[in-house]
Image: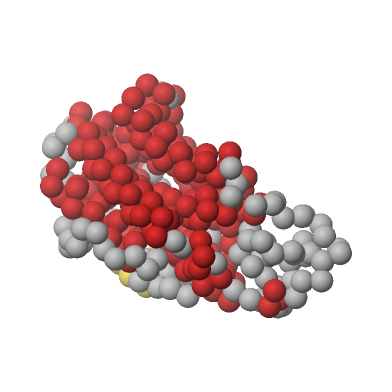
Amino acid sequence: MNRKKIYNPESKENVNDRRVFGGNPTGIFELNNIKYQWAYNLWEVMLNNTWFPKEVDMTRDVNDYKHLTDAEKTAYDKALSQLIFMDSLQTNNLIDNINPYVTAPEINLILVRQSFEEALHSQSYAVMVDSISTNSAEIYDLWRRDMMLKGKNDAIAKVYLELAKNPSEYNFVKACFANQILEGIYFYSGFAYIYTLARSGKMLGSAQMIRFIQRDEVTHLVLFQNLINTLRKERADLFSDTLRAEVIEMFKEAVKLETEWGRYITQGQILGLTDDIVEQYIQFLADERLNAVGFDKVYNVTNPIKWVNDFAKFNDQKTNFFEGTVTNYSKGSLSFDDDF
């Protein structure tokens, strides 16, 4: 694969000639002519979802954190450290590893927006860490000191590093599937631990921050879901039996890795998250992500913690479940079932 030219006045490419990759763009963002309407629709949703960490009140979390059990603190700290790593990785991956090879300007647009949102999430985690920790370096350094976390991070980064080392079309498609795993399994699993604490009335500001973050993650899932499905139409030759088998294996490995991680950080001591529930929830997430990109489900299990969805959703006018006050969310929203 070749990186796209940032300025290419010799190009005569018209809108119908655009491709996800392998096109010949001029470098001009001519957004009055759109080939991939789903991308522009998603761009507008992402703009309407704009928010900033300062909107979230973390005051109560300072005291709540002091009164968490040791097991709850461990789960919170390690889940937060994992989220910090993944948003850091994704910010760089999108800008340096994915977007340079995408040759459709409307898709470039939303990839840049996603990278901004991932960076914003990093700021959000910094606010959370600074609010609850007397030594923020402890949480930020966990990825170096905790070998279980280090091993998981290495496994997550592997496919992205393959693309960086060998930017082939095949590795690009694999990286798109890896994104579905990152955004739709690893992130969602991490969010569930924060929501579980909030369900018992603890760390409500953190859960509110995660709600905003997860609303962004829904659009990120839709972005790569549509990217994969578009590539299947444009480049059916890449979606071979070999790729399909490798993708299934990637998802199975992700489920194994995340299940082990979930059991490790909860130690069976977080109310509402038994080892069996953790495993089934992760299997459920994997099935949902596979099904959305044209694959059969592997595990065929139901969602064992459906209440998580209620914690995560925004409505235009609803009662704030944290404080019981009516809040008007005039910003855009995207339900968990939406597509373009």
Q: Which of 302 and 229 is in front in this view?
A: 229
- Which color mode does the image show? secondary structure
Residue at 58% across, 42% down? 166
Q: Quadrant of residue 293?
A: bottom left
Q: Give the x, y percent position of residue 182.
A: 41, 49
Q: Give the x, y percent position of residue 122.
A: 49, 42
Residue at 38% across, 51% down? 246
Residue at 70% across, 74% down? 17
Determine whether, in the image, residue 44 is placed left or right of residue 335: right
Determine whether, in the image, residue 77 is placed left or right of residue 103: left
Q: Quadrant of residue 92?
A: top right
Q: Give the x, y percent position of residue 177.
A: 44, 55
Residue 130 sits above or below residue 243 on the image:
above
Residue 232 showing in the rendered view: yes
- Residue furthest toward the right? 10
Q: Give the x, y percent position of residue 285.
A: 28, 57
Residue 45 showing in the rendered view: no
Residue at 19% across, 48% down? 279
Number of numbered labels in the structure image: 0
Determine whether, in the image, residue 165 is placed left or right of residue 340: right
